[in-house]
Image (tube, helix red, strand yellow):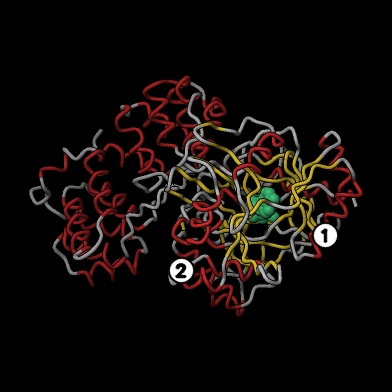
């Protein structure tokens, strides 16, 4: 397919403000793409040349992209940057300059560039390293731009900048596959299992296109492709947990650090974060630990890494552990602030997926493969039928400075990507009033009057994620409690994601002064969850939705959570119900 055909669809996707029409446009596009190109189309829609978990970034700075535009169209870089200052989007600047070129100046390649050609060059840009990198990237991008029509130039430029504004979530892409290939978007469900096991939309598409739904069904867990994390629900107390589990629970401490999914194949170890980004280079001591202590040719483990002082047997608080999330001075940090990985699950062993085994059977296998040292088994790892024992272990955890417990259902499978009552977190305050925080997504801001107006914001419109619909729904306006410094930070962070109209995946009854693409996750504490007719979270028909009472910002979540990892409507409704179980 021609790249210009693809960007015609990008243009349509960008302009729609309804999620259902996003699916229709995607399905129409997908149905025209051949098996050899479908994975490339899927990655390009996400502004990438590889699945999310591959650390392949096309990564070019705004200045370098501006320079490429300047070179492609024979103008000064300063001129390009000046226009960028005015319109706020280098894509639009490229589109304008491309439009000014006389037809004869544009290379005759314009009509010929295929998706495969463009993908190849972008991959080359991503892979360029070492001496002369800057010049090479510049030459490659400007070379591509010379062969683009104006609309294609606009969308192309946004890719290396990481700001392609299509706003399409993975479930919506899956809806598109289902509609294009299975005739009904509701058949997305049949693709979800493969997605949770592989985290790779490209592989799913390629398989669906070449082998049909049977092929997708047989896609399985593989070393090197992160499995989507199983997540935990909340319940108020030990009694309720045992009741829910049918009488017995497997109890582990809840460690407060980074989740690390460990993949080992022979001597090669790769690590992935909670949101499936590769973190291998950050934690050399864990890699060493795995190589020395884990007896298996191939294995996938789920773990939480915490900074730990072995002499005093003290766990360090999350604020200490988090200092390890960095890209520089890694060896030094590994010495001064060593981590321990507490392994709490095993999903794959020596060529076989274990996710369909019971937790009890998985724990048996896990015990046999690890010789504890840097890598340890999650403690106490006890099976119990006693409420009293769970309470004891909970108190024990709190005394040790841990967050609480995660109780797991002994006969449950590892359900990739699921948040259900097979795992239940018991934190110190979950039995009392609302002490657990909520991860909200910034959806827009509303200009204030007076002092705050100077910073361009008076209150933030925030939402949570409706997983079933792949939509962001509003839950609160946050105005008080933010310092001027925080407002400034919000303004800087959201400038990149400002959009002209409501993004297609946002459902809101409130129209803010400025819409922001759902990208920035903040942790919010509120006094209570209440019902409210003005918010769309959990709103069905004329019934009220759910909202936060007295919300305040705790912190920015940083990069460990994507917008789709924010609190879901389902969780919010459950937290609402928990409030009455005191
Ligand atoms: P999420 O549930 O979305 O990860 P969160 O980051 O706010 O939300 P919590 O909900 O508080 O975290 O707790 C779940 C997290 O606890 C897991 O994702 C994992 O990182 C961590 N964790 C620590 N110890 C365990 C354990 N023994 N079993 C499972 N998860 C554990």
Q: What count of labels does the image hold?
A: 2
The circle on residue 305 is none
Which SS class for mark 2? helix
Estimate the x, y position of residue 418 in percent, counting from the top left. Answer: 64, 39
Q: Quadrant of residue 354?
A: top right
Q: Name the residue located 21 percent from the left edge and 41 percent from the top edge.
A: 117
Of 336 and 414, nearer the camera is 336
Q: Which residue is mark 2?
A: 330
Residue 216 in the image: above or below residue 325: above
Of 256 and 380, nearer the camera is 380
Categorize mark 1 by other alpha carbons within 10 Å: few (<14), some (14-19), many (20+).
some
Is the C-beta of the residue carrying label 1 under 8 Å from the nearest atom of ligand 1? no
Categorize mark 2 by other alpha carbons within 10 Å: few (<14), some (14-19), many (20+).
some
- Residue 475 visible in the snapshot: no
Of 423 and 83, nearer the camera is 423
**For this view, does 558 lie left or right of residue 252?**
left
Which SS class for mark 1? helix
Estimate the x, y position of residue 465 in percent, counting from the top left. Answer: 62, 47
Estimate the x, y position of residue 461 in percent, counting from the top left. Answer: 62, 59
Q: Alpha carbon of mark 1 to alpha carbon of mark 2: how far?
A: 33 Å
Q: Which residue is mark 1?
A: 396
Q: Quadrant of residue 409?
A: top right
- Residue 133 visible in the snapshot: yes
**For this view, does 531 lie left or right of residue 456?**
right
**For this view, does 73 lie left or right of residue 196?**
left
Q: Quadrant of residue 487?
A: bottom right
Q: Name the residue located 48 percent from the left edge and 28 percent from the top edge.
A: 219
Is the C-beta of the residue carrying label 2 under 8 Å from the nearest atom of ligand 1? no
Q: Name the residue located 46 percent from the left edge and 59 percent from the top edge.
A: 497
Position of the N terminus, as image quadrant, is top left
Farthest left residue in view:
104
In primary-sequence order, the first of circles 1 and 2 is 2
């Amino acid at each position: 397919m021609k790249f210009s055909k693809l960007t015609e669809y990008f243009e349509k996707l960008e302009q729609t403000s309804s999620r259902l029409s996003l699916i229709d446009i995607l399905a129409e596009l997908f149905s025209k793409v051949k098996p050899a190109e479908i994975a490339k189309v899927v990655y390009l829609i996400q502004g990438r040349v590889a699945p999310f978990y591959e650390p392949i970034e096309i990564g070019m700075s705004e200045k370098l992209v501006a320079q490429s535009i300047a070179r492609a169209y024979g103008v000064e870089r300063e001129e390009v940057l000046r226009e960028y200052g005015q319109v706020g989007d280098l894509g639009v600047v490229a589109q304008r300059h491309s439009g000014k070129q006389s037809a004869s100046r544009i290379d005759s390649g314009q009509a010929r560039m295929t998706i495969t050609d463009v993908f190849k060059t972008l991959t080359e840009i991503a892979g360029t390293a070492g001496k002369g990198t800057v010049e090479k990237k510049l030459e490659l991008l400007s070379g591509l731009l010379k062969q683009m029509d104006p609309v294609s130039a606009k969308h192309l430029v946004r890719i290396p900048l990481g700001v392609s504004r299509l706003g399409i979530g993975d479930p919506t892409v899956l809806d598109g596959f289902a509609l294009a290939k299975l005739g009904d978007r509701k058949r997305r469900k049949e693709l979800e299992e493969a997605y949770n096991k592989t985290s790779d939309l490209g592989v799913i598409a390629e398989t669906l296109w070449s082998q049909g739904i049977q092929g997708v069904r047989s896609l399985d867990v593989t070393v090197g492709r992160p499995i989507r994390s199983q997540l935990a629900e909340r319940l108020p107390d030990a009694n309720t947990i045992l009741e829910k589990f049918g009488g017995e629970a497997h109890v582990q401490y809840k460690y407060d650090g980074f989740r690390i999914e460990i993949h080992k194949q022979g001597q090669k170890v790769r690590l992935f974060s909670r949101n499936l980004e590769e973190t291998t280079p950050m934690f050399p001591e864990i890699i060493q630990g795995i190589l020395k202590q884990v007896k298996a040719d191939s294995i996938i483990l789920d773990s939480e890494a915490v900074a730990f002082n072995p002499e005093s047997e003290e766990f360090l608080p999350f604020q200490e552990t988090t200092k390890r999330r960095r890209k520089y001075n890694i060896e030094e940090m590994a010495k001064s602030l060593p981590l321990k990985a507490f392994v709490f699950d095993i999903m794959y062993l020596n060529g076989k997926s274990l996710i369909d085994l019971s937790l009890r059977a998985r724990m048996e296998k896990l015990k046999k493969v690890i010789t504890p040292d840097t890598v340890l088994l999650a403690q106490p790892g006890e099976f119990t039928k006693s409420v009293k024992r769970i309470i004891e272990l909970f108190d024990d955890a709190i005394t040790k400075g841990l967050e609480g417990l995660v109780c797991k259902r002994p006969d449950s499978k590892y359900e990739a990507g699921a948040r259900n009552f097979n795992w239940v977190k018991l934190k110190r305050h979950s039995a009392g009033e609302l002490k657990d925080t909520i991860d909200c997504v910034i959806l827009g801001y509303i200009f204030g009057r007076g002092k705050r107006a100077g910073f361009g914001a008076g209150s933030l419109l925030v939402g949570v994620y409706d997983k079933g619909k792949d939509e962001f729904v509003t839950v609160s306006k946050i105005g008080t409690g933010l310092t001027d410094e925080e407002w400034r930070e919000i303004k800087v962070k959201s400038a990149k994601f400002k959009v002209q109209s409501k993004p297609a995946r946002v459902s809101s009854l409130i129209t803010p002064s400025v819409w922001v693409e759902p990208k920035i996750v903040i942790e919010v504490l509120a006094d209570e969850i209440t019902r409210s007719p003005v918010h769309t979270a959990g709103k069905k028909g004329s019934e009220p939705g759910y909202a936060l009472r007295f919300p305040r910002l705790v912190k920015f979540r940083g990069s460990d959570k994507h917008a789709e990892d924010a609190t879901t409507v389902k969780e919010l409704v459950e937290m609402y119900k928990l409030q009455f179980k005191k």
